[in-house]
Image: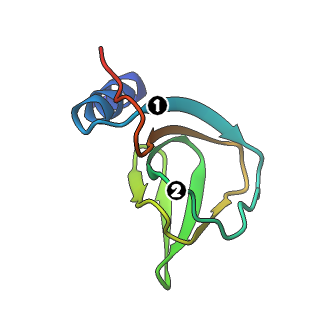
């Protein structure tokens, strides 16, 4: 079974392979609500700890630790985090920016 470090490495390797331009790990407070937003970049998230409910395109889905999800650029969506702290690895592919390189 893959460890959290293995999953994070595979996630970051995928960001490099898919020309993402930046990545970071962020921590969100319990029950934090992002409100509706639509960033101008593609985003890919890996849930490292906790859970997040994604509302997008009229659908709602819960993601747990170890799962990933993607949000295309300019897509209206909302994230609501679970009862505990949530940590996400986040990759962004910004138009016109230089892709990540190893």
Q: Nearer the viewer, residue 58 or 63?
A: 58
**Which percent across, then down, holds residue 65?**
48, 45
3D distance between C-alphas at marks 2 and 1:
14 Å
Vertical placement of 30 versus 18: above or below? below
Q: Nearer the viewer, residue 96 or 31?
A: 96
**Which percent across, then down, holds residue 85?**
71, 43
SS state under label 2:
loop
Residue 40 has which mark? 2
Q: Residue at x 54, y 66 (%)?
A: 54
| Tally of numbered tags | 2
Residue 51 has which mark? none
- Quarter the N terminus occupies: top left
Q: Is residue 8 shown left or right of residue 87?
A: left
Residue 22 has which mark? 1
Vertical placement of 100 versus 74: above or below? above
Outermost bottom residue: 58
Q: Disc 2 vs disc 1: which is toward the camera?
A: 2
**Which percent across, then down, holds residue 100?**
35, 25
**Which percent across, then down, holds residue 76?**
55, 72
Instruction: Please report whichever mark, 2 or 1, sits nearer to the chain's N-terminal start.
Output: 1
Outermost left residue: 17
SS state under label 1:
strand
């Amino acid at each position: 079974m893959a460890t959290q470090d293995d999953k994070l490495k595979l996630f970051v390797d995928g960001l490099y392979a898919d020309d993402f331009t930046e990545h970071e790990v962020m921590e969100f407070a319990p029950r934090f609500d992002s409100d509706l937003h639509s960033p101008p970049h593609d985003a890919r998230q890996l849930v490292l700890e906790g859970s997040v409910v994604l509302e997008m395109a009229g659908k709602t889905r819960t993601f747990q630790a170890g799962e990933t999800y993607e949000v295309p650029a300019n897509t209206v969506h909302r994230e609501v985090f679970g009862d505990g702290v949530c940590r996400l690895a986040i990759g962004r592919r910004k138009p016109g920016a230089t892709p990540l390189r190893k």
